[in-house]
Structures are given as C-alpha cells and as structure tokens.
Image (tube, rainbow, N blue to C red):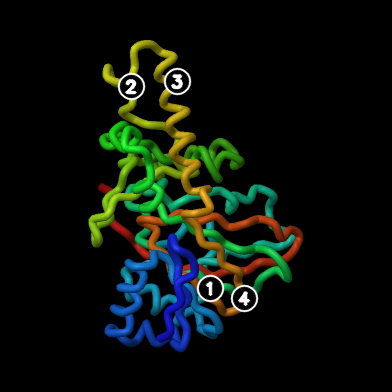
Amino acid sequence: MKIEPLTCALGAEISDIRLAEVGRNADLAGEINALLLQYKVLFFRDQDMTDAEHAGVARQFGDLEDHPLANSADGEPGIIHIWKSPESPPERYENAWHNDATWREIPPMGAVLRCVERPPVGGDTMWANMELAYERLPDHIKEEIADLRARHSMEASFMAAKPIDERLAMKERFPDPEHPVVRTHPVTGKKSLFVNAFTTHFTNYHTASRVRVGQDFTNGSGELLRYLTSQAAIPEYQVRWRWTPNSVAIWDNRCTQHYAVMDYSPCVRRMNRATIIGDRPF
C-alpha cells in the first residue's frame, strides 16, 4: 500500500490496494484499522465493488446498522442509499457539521461511503478532527466542560419538517439520548469534543457553580454550546475530499465530524453507505 497524508490535521489517501480484499483478509483489515486510528479518515480511488463487497469491508470493523429514513440497497440491507437528484425533497440536511447518528443511544463507530455517481462539479465532503479541536481549546474551557453532558435529537433536526404524528412516533422510537460533551475514544483513550448539529442543550449546566440568576443559564449555556459546535468549522482541523466514481471513504465517527457540501443542485449525487455499530460514549 501507498499512504499519502492529505492534511496536517487528518486524512490519508491509500493507493495500490484492492479494497474489496479487506472483506476477505483479516490481516489486511487489521492494517486498515490501524491506519484509521492514526489518520481518522481514509480515502481510496478506483474501487469497483459490488454492494456485497462494500458491506464485507465494513463488517470487518463490526456489525452494520440501518437508518430509519434511508432506503437500503436491493439484496444488501447493510448498504443504504444516499441518493440526491432534482426530484429529491427540499429538506436536505447534509450541510451541517455532525457525527453520524448521535441521536442514538449508541452512535455508529464509523462508516464506509462509496461514490456511485457524482455531480460534474461540487458535492465534496469535509471532515474535521474533533480530538484536535478539543486539544486546542483554552484550558479554562476544558475545565468548564469536563463534566458537562448534552442532549442530542433527531426530532429537532431532520425530523422537524415531518408531520407531527410521524415526528412523535420517531421520537418514541429514538428518545433523545444524553452524551458526554467530552468523549474518550474506546481504543486510543484520546479525548474529543462531542457536540454537533444534533446537540440541543446541556443537561447538567444549571448548577450553583455556573448559574447565579436565570440570565446566566440562558446566555451562558447557549453561548458555550454555540462556541463548541463552531470548532468543527475551523479549517486547520479539516480535510476536504473531491469524489470520483468508485472512490471510497472510511471514517472514525467517534472522533470526527463531517459536512456534505450541498453546492451541486440540481445535479445528481448518488452515494452508498455502510454504517458500523459502535459503543456507548463515555
């Protein structure tokens, strides 16, 4: 394999490899997993794979999960379609910085995303290193957030445009979970900032050490959350990937956020994704 780091923050392009072999070779899968822990997101080009091979690669990292609102590939339920076209509904929420599915009690460990069809121009995806974002926070902010926890919601994001009965039914199925604001990686032990577009509020901010009067709570908590969620938008923490057909990205959802740039309407963009079940954040 040839390994080319793409930025100082995260990301590496891996070449001279047939990625489908990862699904059949445990030793090769171990090498890719080690590189993923190092670079946090890996990129591959010219990987012509079937949906079954795509799912086989992802299953080397763990069991696969579904998505309640995304269609699955025919004959391969581990692969979901993220397909956009001029006929797609207008409520498109790709373009917000997020870790995948933190509205689940157990968010995904990561994902394997394959480009099936891309726009002539645009449709890039960006990733941000949230370990670096945490590391570079001022010390007084690290002290402030060390014990904070926050609520994450699907209802308040892409379910908001749905009819009320559908929204409430999904809320009952996926109650808004509470996660630590600072997450510890279960393998490396490194800390990362774990708030994103799905985060609605801190759940334990209103304490005597932080709040004297009501204004402290409404302004203090809101401004702190906005400050923390803005960290993913700092270019020094990012990598940007231009898709080509049959290119693939594998990322660690536990310590990165990503942003699908919605600049290609009304063109077609078709992506297939396998999402890997993770562990409870701590």
Residue type at tag 1: Arg
When asked about the image quadrant of residue 143, the answer is: top left
Closer to viewer: mark 4 or mark 1:
4
Up-down: is 47 above or below 8? below
SS for callout 1: strand
Judging by the rendered image, the residue that carries numbered circle 2 is 206
User: Residue 40 appears at what percent x and percent y?
Assistant: 39, 64
Disc 4 is placed on an element classified as loop
Query: Marks 3 and 1: which is nearer the front?
Result: 3
Q: Where is residue 173 in the image (x, y as percent from the top left)?
A: 40, 45
**What type is the residue that disc 4 sits on?**
Thr
Disc assigned to residue 114:
1
Which of the image's four quarters has the N terminus? Answer: bottom left
* Residue drawn where x is 48% and y is 73% of the image: 43
Disc 3 marks which amino acid? Thr
Tell me how far mark 3 sits from mark 1, CA to CA.
42 Å
Kindly indicate whether the residue at mark 1 contacts the one at mark 3 (C-beta within 8 angstroms): no
For marks 4 and 3, the one nearer the N-term is 3
Which of marks 2 and 4 precedes in the sequence?
2
Q: Earlier in the sequence, mark 3 or mark 1?
A: 1
Residue linked to disc 4: 244
Q: Contact (CB < 8 A) between labels 2 and 1?
A: no
Q: What residue type is labelled 2?
A: His
Residue at (38% x, 37% y) in the render: 151
Q: Residue 218 carries which label?
A: 3
Q: How far apart are marks 4 and 2 (CA)?
A: 48 Å
Q: State the residue at coordinates (41%, 13%).
A: 214
Foreground: 156 or 173?
Answer: 156
